[in-house]
Amino acid sequence: MHLARYPRRFIAHLPTPLERLDRLSKELGGPEIWIKRDDCTGLSTGGNKTRKLEFLMAEAELQDADVVITQGATQSNHARQTAAFAAKLGIQCHILLEDRTGSNDANYKNNGNVLLDHLHGATTETRPGGLDMNAEMEAVAERMRAEGKKVYTIPGGGSNATGALGYVNCAFELLGQANDRGLRIDRLVHATGSAGTQAGLITGLKATNANIPLLGIGVRAPKAKQEENVYNLAVKTAEKLGCPGVVAREDVVANTDYVGDGYGIPTEGGMEAIRMFAELESILLDPVYSAKGAAGLIDLIRKGHFDKEERVVFLHTGGAAALFGYDAAFDFSGRWVAS
Ligand SMILES: *Cc1c(COP(=O)(O)O)cnc(C)c1O
């Protein structure tokens, strides 16, 4: 597969490091846990959306867009990385933020990713939860087009076949690192939301016959819906790459037992994961995505889901900027207070 055939705006700090987590592995008594540091992609505190935006923003530039519009939840990491990428390219960025949690906390509404959206010069408007946000975005785009603007719209999470190419690339990158270091990888685990990360990864892993089972830990949708979303996008991604049919439905596996009360609502398991990663490995997780992914990883390890001898890679998808919008979820000693 030949990713150089697709337009790409190189901006991410790649390859991201692949590191062994000795203290966390010891604490849990095996398997051997490694981490792929996509929290270190470099753009405005990093995260997984930067890889997708390399392909999406290249398309926007090719189309001579003068505005990009995207949408996400209030503390969207995707929105923040889009705002930063657009600033770097000198393209205006407009963001629709959906109030999915109903939180009135001042830091949730204005700090963390929201602060960074504005620092990068993006304009934002808000919507109540539960609307069809891609439709809301298209309506705004139509208004701007009527004013003569060239608008490029990016779906929530940057999750279409173009954005997913970024995670096909990540699969290649990870395999290259493993092969260079003689490192057999038995499992790959990560947080899955708008599906582009998992769809790109599974397409890249299957197309290269890597034989690494991939597990997405859900943060929003129920299992059947999440797997369907990922599978449908993987099918489109494989078609775009010229290898239709490489991904089978059973290759797409999501575990949605760690969503808790809903998208963006912290869970006890997630807060424990934040503490463990911070105290044992000095790695920052976020309560919305990576902490729930890590909570799933930790719980599955405790339940004996993985062999002690296996080598499990956790893909850190980023998100730590959201911590500053979620400070109310911690007490002063950094401990979760059940509300
Ligand atoms: C968006 C996001 C995810 C989920 O990735 P998708 O491609 O949307 O499934 C995971 N972690 C973080 C920190 C994110 O911002």
Image: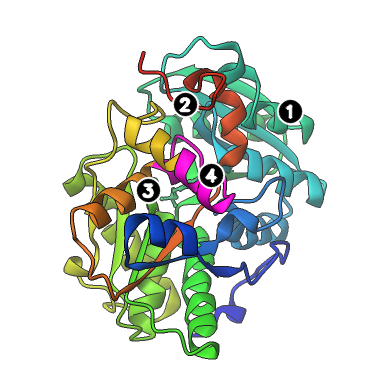
Compute the Cα span from label 2 to label 4. 12 Å
Q: Amino acid at mark 1?
A: His
- Please tell me how crowded label 4 is: few (under 14), some (14-19), or many (20+) other residues with Cα within 10 Å: few
| First-in-chain label (1 vs 4) | 1
Q: In the picture shown, does residue 309 fall above or below 36?
A: below
- Please tell me how crowded label 2 is: few (under 14), some (14-19), or many (20+) other residues with Cα within 10 Å: few
Range of residues picked out in magenta:
275-291
Percent coordinates x, y for residue 324 in the rendering: 62, 27
* Residue 266 magenta: no
From the viewer's perspective, tell me whether residue 160 is left or right of residue 255. right
Q: Secondary structure at mark 4?
A: helix
Discs 3/1, front: 3
Q: Secondary structure at mark 2?
A: loop
Dot 4 beta carbon under 8 Å from ligand 1? no
To which residue does mark 1 refer?
118
Colour logic = rainbow
Q: Amino acid at mark 4?
A: Glu
Dot 3 beta carbon under 8 Å from ligand 1? yes
Tell me whether the residue at label 3 lies in contact with that at label 2, contact meaning CB atoms closer than 8 angstroms.
Answer: no
Q: Secondary structure at mark 3?
A: helix
Q: Amino acid at mark 2?
A: Arg
